[in-house]
Image (tube, rainbow, N blue to C red):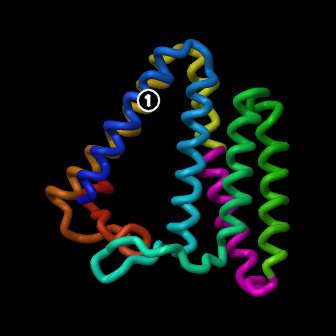
């Protein structure tokens, strides 16, 4: 499936679910569940991208069984911590829950990283990567549920703006992009799409 086809298939499945959780359920629980699942996948994708983990494929590009991933435990603990951040902030609010949940997750990730003695020379880099991922993904996505409290239209406009700008950047990059923006991170992203 092409990149565009994959994006369209994802949108066909996820957009109706997102709209239903915004407008059908008047409580914050459905959007909290949706945001938690989305943040877990986004955090794992972020960690894979920054740590340079690529899934193995054969000569035709078909996925192969997962090989030994040295960062699996760290990604698992970070993902569970990210879910904990999302759920605790969704239940008790950011002022009460964000700092303790983020601290507990950071300590759990640091412990996990330090127990992998084989990778101690890169422990600082790995911890910085996990910490930046926790601040970038779940700490920002945990505002979805409280934002719905102001009315679902506010959250809808916020998400539509983010998704719309991402979609326009994708098509601008495909139409006008020649020079890669940062090939080591995202090989097909172009300067035209970034602007």
Residue 170 locus on image (x, y percent): 27, 52
Helix, strand or loop for disc 1? helix
Q: Quadrant of the N terminus?
A: bottom left
Residue 114 locus on image (x, y percent): 83, 75
Q: Main secondary structure of the magenta part?
A: helix
Q: Which residues are magenta?
A: 117-138
Relative side of 82 to 100, left or right: left
Residue sitting at 58 percent across and 64 percent down?
A: 47
In the image shown, does 17 or 139 lie closer to the viewer? 17
148 in magenta: no
Q: Is residue 143 above or below residue 105?
A: above
Q: Is residue 113 above or below residue 42?
A: below
Quadrant of the image occupied by residue 79: bottom right
Q: Is residue 15 above or below residue 186?
A: above
Relative side of 4 to 187, left or right: left
Q: Mark 1 — residue?
A: 17
Residue sitting at 65 percent across and 78 percent down?
A: 70
Q: Is residue 13 above or below residue 104?
A: above
134 in magenta: yes
Quadrant of the image occupied by residue 48: bottom right
Quadrant of the image occupied by residue 32: top right
In the image shown, does 29 or 43 lie closer to the viewer? 29
Relative side of 132 to 174, left or right: right
Residue 152 locus on image (x, y percent): 50, 17
Residue sitting at 66 percent across and 63 percent down?
A: 75
């Amino acid at each position: 499936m092409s990149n565009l086809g994959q994006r369209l298939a994802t949108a066909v499945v996820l957009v109706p679910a997102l709209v239903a959780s915004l407008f059908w359920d008047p409580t914050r629980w459905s959007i909290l569940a949706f945001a938690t699942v989305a943040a877990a996948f986004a955090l794992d994708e972020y960690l894979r991208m920054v740590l340079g983990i690529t899934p193995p494929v054969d000569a035709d590009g078909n996925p192969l069984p997962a090989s030994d991933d040295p960062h699996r435990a760290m990604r698992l603990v970070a993902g569970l911590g990210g879910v904990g951040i999302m759920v605790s902030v969704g239940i008790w609010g950011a002022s009460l829950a964000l700092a303790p949940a983020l601290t507990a997750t950071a300590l759990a990730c640091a412990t996990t990283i330090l127990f992998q003695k084989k990778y101690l020379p890169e422990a600082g880099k790995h911890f910085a990567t996990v910490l930046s991922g926790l601040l970038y993904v779940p700490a920002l996505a945990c505002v979805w549920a409280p934002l719905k409290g102001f009315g679902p239209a506010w959250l809808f406009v916020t998400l539509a703006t983010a998704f719309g700008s991402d979609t326009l950047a994708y098509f601008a990059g495909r139409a006008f992009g020649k020079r890669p923006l940062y090939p080591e991170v995202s090989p097909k992203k172009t300067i035209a799409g970034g602007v």
